Image: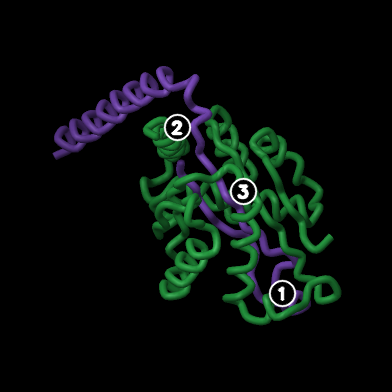
Chain colours: A green, B purple
Amino acid sequence: MVLFDEEANACDQRISLLRRELKFSENYEFHFTENSKRIRIEFLKAIQPYNFMYFAVALNKDDQKLWGPGFSTKESFYKYTCQMVFTNAMPYLDEAIVILDKSGNPEFRSRLAKYLKKRLNKDNQRIIKKIKQQKSSSNNLLQLADYISGIINRKSLDKKDWHEYYKYIAPREIWVQVWPK
Amino acid sequence: MLVFIDEAGDTDRKIEGGSSRFFVISLVLFDEEANACDQRISLLRRELKFSFHWFYLMKKLMLVTRE
């Protein structure tokens, strides 16, 4: 169990070091949509050596494709997408400590945590051990998750330069589901 | 096992009004694949710690010198 933390810890420290190399303040938050191309590439090169995997769900919000009660409110929309990505990752998860971005409505985040635990944990298998909420500004690995989401969004939109970023994370991809097709 | 969740886009349905076309949630997982690299990572941690201590020491010294 310690080994997981070692790898995450090493990646975390590398991102902190990158901040210094780029002469940013200790509180600087890497954010894919706000960063320049140069910063994006530097960030993606820095995280290259670390062993992580990712799953993503890209929900196409086109009215012609997406309808139903699960998408009527913002809260149910978020819950549904979250549940999809966890279900896809389920074979890989065991006693996971989950860290969510603290921004947004704290009551909703608490409800989401309860919902995910109830839906995914079974009597004989605990998929999620604990769910924590942390500020993305103070958590480098939430900033890494932001980069992954940003790149998958860009790829889903078929923006002309998506492959320039995607090539750095492609080897870490397990499954990205674009839904509905 | 550590899992980090973050999203891109928004959950608003008014795409013509400026909302994103896609809503993306990513799940980043750090798993035990690090096993083979365990020793190297431990060493890296020590190296980085050393360099961080050195960095702070230099920063402190520079502040003292300026005062």
Query: Callout 1: residue from which chain?
Result: B
- Image position of A175 (left or right of A33): right
Q: Residues within 10 Å of mark 1 (few under 14, many from 20)?
A: few
For disc 2, the marked residue is: A7
How far from the left and from the top, in percent, is residue A48?
A: 58, 31
Name the residue: 71% across, 77% down.
B13
How far apart are the alpha carbons under marks 2 and 1?
39 Å
Look at the picture and state if B38 lies above or below A158: above
Q: Which mark is residue A89?
A: 3
Instruction: Kindly identify the amino acid type of the residue bearing the numbered disc 2.
Output: Glu
Instruction: Kindly identify the amino acid type of the residue bearing the numbered disc 3.
Output: Ala
Q: Which mark is residue B18?
A: 1
Task: Determine if residue A86 is in view.
Answer: yes
Instruction: Kindly identify the amino acid type of the residue bearing the numbered disc 1.
Output: Gly
How far apart are the alpha carbons under marks 2 and 3?
19 Å
Query: Callout 3: residue from which chain?
Result: A
Look at the picture and state if A40 lies above or below B35: below
- Image position of B15 (left or right of B64): right
Name the residue: 76% across, 50% down.
A155
**Tags 3 and 1 on a common chain:** no
In this orientation, which residue lies closer to the viewer: A70 or B10?
A: A70
Q: Quadrant of the C terminus of chain A?
A: bottom right
How far apart are the alpha carbons under marks 3 and 1?
31 Å
User: Is disc 2 placed on a helix, strand or loop?
Assistant: helix
Query: Callout 2: residue from which chain?
Result: A
How far from the left and from the top, in percent, is residue A111?
A: 46, 72
How far from the left and from the top, in percent, is residue B46?
A: 32, 23
How far from the left and from the top, in percent, is residue B62?
A: 21, 33
Name the residue: 51% across, 68% down.
A115
